[in-house]
Amino acid sequence: MYKVDEIILYDTEGVCKISEITEKDFGGEKQKYYILNSINKNGMTIYVPVDNEKQTSKMRKILSSEEIFKLIKNMPNEDMIWIENDSERRDIYKKIIQSGDRRDLIKLIITLHYHKDELIKQGKKLHMSDEQFMKNAERILHDEFSHVLNIRPNEVVSFIVNELKSEQTN
């Protein structure tokens, strides 16, 4: 069970703080809820029923700075996950976004950036759905990394690139 004041990730909404755990009456039935307040989306409040496994499974502990550095250190060894079949690719990418697995999110971002660069060389554009998957994955990862590392979300990519460069020189 999570605790009040704990910082977590919730689904695709990003970093949230558990402001309270309380009973609420929605629809005539009292139930215990986690009250989540988004850290980066001012004013957004999310109510998660404590006893609803489907909803609570979307709550994840945030990574520590050590875990983030380790993840970045292992990034060059990650395989890309490009899938030619549009429908199959959408299904798999959707599952990756929903899972929130940071390693898979990084692989997804790297894959889509690489594919986008290749398409641009051919005078083409990335499919709109792939572009959306890339933005969602980046937002989730940037939200968490910026919070944990105390940097702005738009600094996350340059931070990762700099860390990768320093790993290559060591």
Image: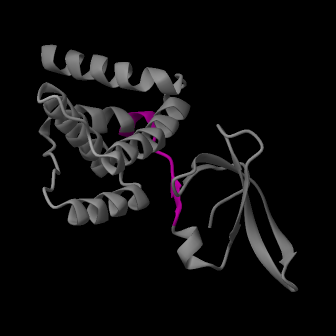
Q: Report if residue 131 is visible in the image.
A: yes
Locate residue 100, reporting x and y percent.
Answer: 41, 55
In the picture, the quarter occupied by the C terminus is top left
Q: Report if residue 170 is visible in the image.
A: no
Q: Residue furthest front?
A: 123
Locate residue 108, reporting x and y percent.
Answer: 27, 46
Q: What span is in magenta?
A: 58-67
Residue at image coords 18%, 38%: 115
Q: Is residue 47 above or below residue 51?
A: above
Residue at image coords 32%, 25%: 160
Residue at image coords 37%, 25%: 157
- Residue situated in front as seen by the camera: 105 or 2: 105
Locate residue 89, reporting x and y percent.
Answer: 23, 59
Q: Is residue 155 left or right of residue 87?
A: right
In the picture, the quarter occupied by the N terminus is bottom right
On the image, which quarter does residue 137 sit in? top left
- Residue situated in front as seen by the camera: 47 or 81: 81
Q: Is residue 130 magenta?
A: no
Q: Residue furthest bottom?
A: 29
Residue at image coords 35%, 63%: 95
Total number of numbered discs in the rendering: 0
